[in-house]
Image (cartoon, rainbow, N blue to C red):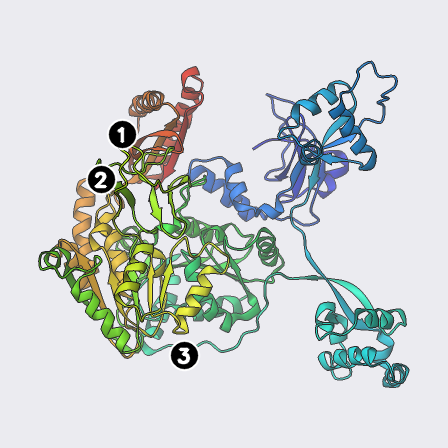
Amino acid sequence: MFTYKIPKNLQPQIQIGLRVIVQFGKKKVLTGIIGKVHNKPPQAYEAKPILDILDDQPSVNPLQIRFWFWMAEYYFCHIGEVMFASIPSGLRLSSESKIQANPNFDLETSKYPLDVREEKILEALEKKEELSYEDCEEILGVKTIHPILKSLVAKEAILIFEKVQEKYTPKVETRIRLKEEFVQSKGALEAIFEAVQGKPKQESILLKYLRDVPVFNKPKLNEKGVDKASLLEEGDSESSLKTLIKNGVFESFKHVVNRIDEEEAEREASLLSSTQQVAFDEIKTHFESKQSVLLHGVTGSGKTEIYIKLIQEVLESGSQVLMLLPEIALTTQIVGRLKQVFGSQMGVYHSKYSDNERVEVWNGVLSGRFPFVVGVRSSIFLPFDSLGLVIVDEEHEPSYKQFDPAPRFHARDAAIMLAYFHQAKTLLGSATPSFESYYNANQGKYGYVQLSHRFGDASLPEFFLSNISADRKKNLLKLDSTRLLREKIQHALDQQQQVIIFQNRRGYSPYVQCEDCSWTGQCVQCDVSLTYHQFAEELRCHYCGYKEKIPSSCPACGSTQLSTQGMGTERIEESLSLLFPEARMGRMDLDTTRSKYGYQRLLDEFAAGQIDILVGTQMITKGLDFGKVTVVGIWDGDRILNFPDFRAGERAYQQITQVAGRAGRRDIQGQVVIQSRNPDQELFQKVIQGDYFEFFRQEMIDRKKYYYPPFVKLVKITTRHADAKTAEKAAHALHYQMANVAVKKIVLGPEKGIIARIKNQYQYESLIKLDRQGATQSVFKENLARIIEELQSVPEFRSVRWVVDVDPS
């Protein structure tokens, strides 16, 4: 955060939340947001003046800025990092270095001769007022222009300046409308028709306009006119239209078009069942005394219909509503249902939108156009000014946690604080609540409402454990699928039903291995194996993006005996295609959904019955509802359990229960097959029994014994450096200093990261367990900030990076 002077001429316009242009450093020009106005000039430096104000009205409101300061303090990051995450890039100005000819430079009198390349730049500036760096590189055919421009500046031949540009550009279309005198008088219009007789192209355009715009029944429609392109789309002549405009029949005008589709509501909200109505009433009762309520409803219990009724009530009261979803994949299906009820009142906000589209949603919230927004975690930063309700659906999902870059916030927890600042209510919904949320409900901090039956009394799915090891011994395993799973899939296909197969690993195969010397492809920047992607015929790192072609022979021993090991979604799709050649296959993972409409296309095809078997990663576990899915297969149940994390059991329970919830739903009981090498594991039994409460009780015993959430707060500190020894030394120096901080805590580590090197940075991790009292956390964070600042002043540690993650997921 930096302090700038307010010039006298700008003082009457200054408001908190306005965007301003400021100079940063000697040359850079940046966008800033006014966060505070005060009369305390900085002592360490002389404040520069604000250059200009960009907005007539604030783009950010005081409640947002208050929320930003809380987030920066709680999640241990800079307020600028929060602002950068909050503001759509389309609202952040960009400055680009531009080159101009120095008007005072005279080549003939200059004592500095120019070389051929320098003369070319000046010749180009005679034809064009200004050039970019890229323009200059293209003119000279060089990769870097800096030395040449530096020489020209030294010879006083050119000037370099920063040009500030707004990134957001409104979408403008040319529209056509009848001149007003023809709308007011039928006689005048009849005269026009007489004038165009014998001119069929002009007559066709006129008739088409009147067909699309009934100007006499609804004269106001003429103000909007029609899009020029649509008026000419049937092959009518543009020259004929120009003649009509020239003759004063039509007029042409520019119109700013919304990029966000406006759809009208199509249906009323469904009536709640008696069970849903009871839950709705209980939620309302809890809201009278509590800010937050946990709605614990089994998969398929109809939580969305309860959400809809609550949203309607809040919107009718004049307040705003935010509904958070964990994944874009989930938004594509639930948004359709919500749009049918709320129509143009509802905005959608997620990362698949372009910068311009995100700006339009932002402005739509500011203007009141979108009182209701559905979106992923970044939606908490939208400029709400009167929130009445925040809904966090699938609140247990790990994808609500932001990992990189800062702020490393948890959207569920941040949303609760956002609601608190607005004095709004928060509803958390899940079939498998996070242990933190259920603990808060159990302790009376949150209200608690349970929906224990599926909507319409649909049956919960039946579970089957299938032993991979036993099938392998009996020679019944085919392409890593057990006989039981194959039989269940075949039966579903025979009945024209659909199947979902879950495997939480994308790609074709986890790695490629040499059968002679056991070589495996390793990332050159990270200490991980490269994943084989058959479609692209390459090995990829899922941590840094590095990729290379598959070698034709082993780089270590020269053998050509290279084989793929393990199963990713791509390979499972191929295997099932071989086992069930008549089945139509689909795959949902990061690789197949990169495009803007990738999720929607797959979901539409699956919903339309164009896909029989859908293979996917965790994207398919989240709240999707398809009536014809009767079988769910979990390809590798053991892999879900085997994570070195205290939440491994909780996450496995949630993931299996959630993906199992995709089976059945209506008049047919679903079936879930879990493939495992050790099917007798206790967690599988807990999932099959569906006893969440007993599972929670047992987990809490261990969490309390070993000091893990929800009984303590966790802070993870990662020390990173390009040199392994420096990283280790810095991590131990930090550990030593933290041990002396006088607060109740447990400090574990430092240890090498699970992946010791990522993007050529070696990693050491420390885990701090803190008392849950707010005062303890504040004192610790203040001391941690001081310690890191002191260590960064040590020459050896200046290039060390410390990453602080509060409430790591």
Q: Quadrant of the N terminus?
A: top right
Under mark 3, the amino acid is Leu
Q: Amino acid at mark 1?
A: Glu
Residue 707: give its label: 2
The CA span between labels 1 and 2 is 19 Å
Label drawn at residue 271: 3
Residue 384 shown left or right of residue 724 in the figure: right
Q: Earlier in the sequence, mark 1 or mark 2?
A: 2
Quadrant for the C terminus in the image: top left
Mark 2, Cα crowd under 10 Å, few <14 / some 14-19 / many 20+, is some
Mark 2 or 3, nearer chain start: 3
For disc 3, the neighbor class at 10 Å (few under 14, some 14 to 19, many from 20) is few
Apparent side of residue 353 relative to residue 732 in the rendered image (left or right) = right
What residue does disc 1 label? 751
Nearer-the-camera pick, 567 or 467: 567
In the rendered image, residue 251, in percent from the top left (x then y), is placed at: 83, 69
